[in-house]
Image (cartoon, rainbow, N blue to C red):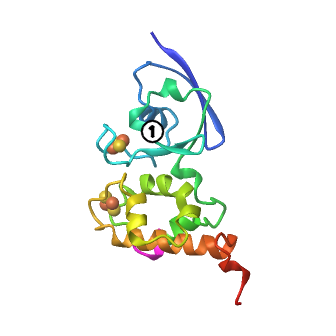
Amino acid sequence: MTRTVAVTINGATFEREVEPRLLLSDFIRHEAKLTGTHVGCEHGVCGACTVQLDGTPVRSCLMFAVQASGHSIRTVEAMADGGSETRLHPLQQAFHEEHALQCGFCTPGFLMSLEPLIPALVGASDDEIREAIAGNLCRCTGYQNIVSAVRLAAKRFDAQHGTNGSATGPE
Ligand code: FES
Ligand code: FES
């Protein structure tokens, strides 16, 4: 028996008849054809499958697609501004500049986990940043460059939005 699932992904509605056991990660990759969401461990450990459900990062391998019906999902594909000259999201740009990826398999999950946290990470210590990324595993980078990218993204966010008052200019 199948069930109807209707979810909004990156602003577009996807309605499909699916098996109740279909994972959200498989719905995103195979039904919506958005393969930027990666699947690693498939049991909630690696974080590669992280997407945002109504703005909150979730592991899409730990949810059934039917549980997401009626909700709004954001995936890594929504981050860059895909005009004629694609402009990266500031967090993606920071990852690029700080060499925070090698194979890139883990990267969409890191980006989806970190994006809502950047305002809270302005001025964070390395330990605090490492705590923020503790739910995502990377087999390549050794993490230091990811920490540097998060620090750069938070600094730029602060410069733009003045979350700690530093954007108000020299005293
Ligand atoms: S694939 Fe979902 S947490 Fe690893
Ligand atoms: S860049 Fe390869 S797993 Fe993270």
Left or right: where does residue 21 sit relative to residue 57? left
Which residue does the numbered mark 1 point to in the structure image? 29
Q: Is mark 1 within 8 Å of ligand 1?
A: no
Q: Position of residue 134 (x, y in %)?
A: 36, 56
Q: Is residue 49 visible?
A: yes
Residue located farthest toward the top when viewing the structure as drawn: 1
Q: Position of residue 141 (x, y in %)?
A: 30, 67
Instruction: Determine the secondary structure under disc 1.
Output: helix
Q: Position of residue 11 (x, y in %)?
A: 66, 42
| Residue displayed at 32% across by 48% down | 46
Would you say residue 98 sits in the magenta stretch? yes
- Please tell me in which quadrant of the rendered image residue 20 appears: top left
Ligand 2 location (quadrant): bottom left
Q: How many marks?
A: 1
Left or right: where does residue 14 sit relative to residue 45? right
| Residue displayed at 66% across by 61% down | 83
Q: Is residue 171 above or below residue 81?
A: below
Would you say residue 80 sits in the magenta stretch? no
Using a 10 Å C-alpha cutoff, classify the residue at mark 1 as few (fewer than 14 neighbours), some (14 to 19) or many (20 or more). Answer: some
> Bounds of the magenta span?
95-100
Q: Position of residue 109 (x, y in %)?
A: 43, 52
Q: Is residue 100 above or below residue 5?
A: below
Nearest the viewer among 36 and 107 is: 107
- Please tell me in which quadrant of the rendered image residue 25 appears: top left
Quadrant location of the C terminus in the rendered image:
bottom right
Nearest the viewer among 92 and 122 is: 122
Q: Amino acid at mark 1?
A: Arg
